[in-house]
């Protein structure tokens, strides 16, 4: 029984601890909501798959966890209320600007963003590159809807707010919190479709844990982020179009040409192994290579493997391809979109991919 209700026990102890904080004024943590399973509403407590992502509003979501009141003042702003696969780049830019402006207020300790888990790693990495603040920015989701028996959202939300007010959480870049674990936006990826332990920070490990006694950090990201990022979306309302092509045995040829036709300015290959694409597919790049360098899409090699580096190799030099290092394809896409707002120079682009 104790194991099964362990989360409730942790929450109860945490609250008694938080009551001690009642002597000093509570910190303020602004909560931006976007929808997802954490705000999902199903038809019954056992509905774990047919629920509506973003079925309750941001205000309802936060009000459903009254224990937050003992940790912080938590004003809520709903940015969207959708499944995270339906968020847009306009939503990202809006969020980045609002978070930067919110954190510039000395009265605000940190920001929490509730988000669907499907693309939480993408929004987190975008914000990691564009928010200008050293204060904690924490994305949080859930694997079970708010109406589910043993919903994981309420404790995840309490944990996210605890991280947002933790003194050690400053200057760690944007973080993702689920399942009592803190991950770096750059490294985290969703690697299970169903389980509550769906997120792993690839080879590099969690930044820390959220336990009853404390928020415990063990490491900090060293790649450039937030205040050390050169990217600025404060005056942009869109980003260059970048798409991803998945590599596999005997791909249909002509997909790159099709992407060029619909206006892709960058193409990220989710290559096999350490970033390889087939010889016929390389051959099919002849039309792209015939384009003038200033309009040709920039090509980046990432990997479909999920761990490890992709490095520059001789085979891909003639195509001017950039190596994505350890960024997975969906994160390499985000970095390339932002990089293309600054440069098309291959050396500069490779420098960017080695620093972020
Ligand atoms: N199943 C997703 C989630 O866990 C839905 C979404 O990404 O919005 O939140």
Image: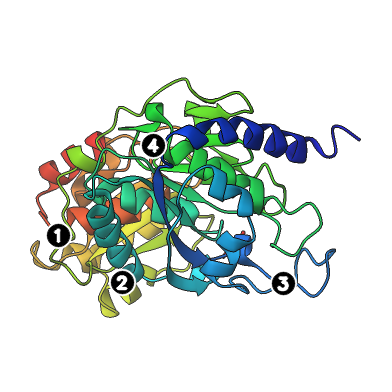
As drawn, 210 above or below 343: above
Q: Residues within 10 Å of mark 3 (few under 14, many from 20)?
A: many
Disc 4 C-beta below 8 A from ligand 1? no
Dot 1 or dot 3, earlier in sequence: 3
Q: Which residue is mark 3?
A: 51
Q: Is mark 1 within 8 Å of ligand 1?
A: no
Please name the residue that numbered disc 4 is placed on. 326
Please identify the residue farthest to the front as the structure is shown. 23
Disc 2 beta carbon < 8 A from ligand 1? Answer: no
Please report whichever mark, 4 or 2, sits nearer to the chain's N-terminal start: 2
Q: Nearer the viewer, residue 119 or 266?
A: 119
Q: 138 or 325: which is nearer to us?
A: 138
Q: Read off the residue under disc 1.
A: 341
Sequence-wise, the earlier of marks 4 and 3 is 3
Residue 190 in the image, given as x and y percentages of width and height: 57, 48
Local SS, label 1: loop
Measure the C-alpha gap from mark 2 to mark 1.
Answer: 15 Å
Q: Which mark is residue 90?
A: 2
Point 74% across, 39% down: residue: 7
> How many numbered circles are shown?
4
Q: Is residue 191 visible?
A: no
Position of the N terminus by quadrant: top right
Per the model, the C-alpha gap separating discs 1 and 3 is 39 Å
Q: Is residue 223 left or right of residue 117?
A: left
């Amino acid at each position: 029984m104790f194991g099964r209700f362990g989360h409730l026990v942790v929450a109860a102890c945490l609250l008694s601890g938080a009551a001690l904080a009642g002597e000093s004024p509570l910190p303020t943590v602004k909560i931006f909501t976007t929808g997802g399973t954490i705000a999902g509403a199903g038809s019954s407590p056992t509905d774990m798959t047919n629920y509506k992502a973003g079925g309750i509003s941001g205000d309802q979501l936060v009000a459903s966890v009254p224990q937050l009141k003992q940790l912080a003042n938590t004003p809520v702003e709903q940015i969207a209320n959708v499944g995270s696969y339906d968020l847009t780049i306009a939503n990202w830019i809006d969020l980045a600007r609002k978070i930067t402006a919110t954190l510039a207020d000395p009265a605000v300790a940190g920001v929490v963003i509730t988000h669907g888990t499907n693309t939480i790693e993408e929004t987190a990495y975008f914000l990691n590159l564009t928010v200008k603040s050293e204060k904690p920015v924490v994305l949080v989701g859930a694997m079970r809807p708010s109406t589910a028996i043993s919903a994981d959202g309420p404790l995840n939300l309490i944990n996210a707010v605890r991280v947002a007010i933790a003194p050690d959480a400053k200057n760690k870049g944007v973080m993702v919190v689920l399942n009592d674990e803190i991950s770096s936006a750059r490294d985290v990826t969703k690697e299970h479709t169903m389980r509550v332990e769906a997120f792993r920070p690839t080879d590099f490990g969690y930044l820390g844990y959220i336990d009853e006694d404390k928020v415990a950090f063990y490491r900090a990201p060293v790649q450039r982020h937030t205040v050390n990022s050169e990217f600025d979306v404060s005056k942009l309302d869109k980003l260059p179009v970048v798409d991803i092509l998945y590599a596999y045995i005997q791909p249909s040829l002509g997909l790159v040409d099709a992407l060029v036709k619909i206006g892709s300015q960058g193409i990220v290959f989710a290559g096999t192994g350490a970033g390889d694409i087939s010889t016929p597919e390389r051959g099919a790049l002849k039309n792209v290579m015939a384009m003038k360098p200033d309009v040709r899409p920039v090509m980046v090699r990432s990997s479909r493997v999920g761990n490890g580096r992709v490095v520059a190799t001789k085979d891909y030099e003639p195509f001017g391809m950039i190596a994505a290092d350890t960024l997975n394809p969906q994160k390499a896409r985000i970095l390339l979109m932002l990089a293309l707002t600054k440069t098309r120079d291959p050396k500069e682009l490779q420098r960017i991919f080695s620093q972020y």
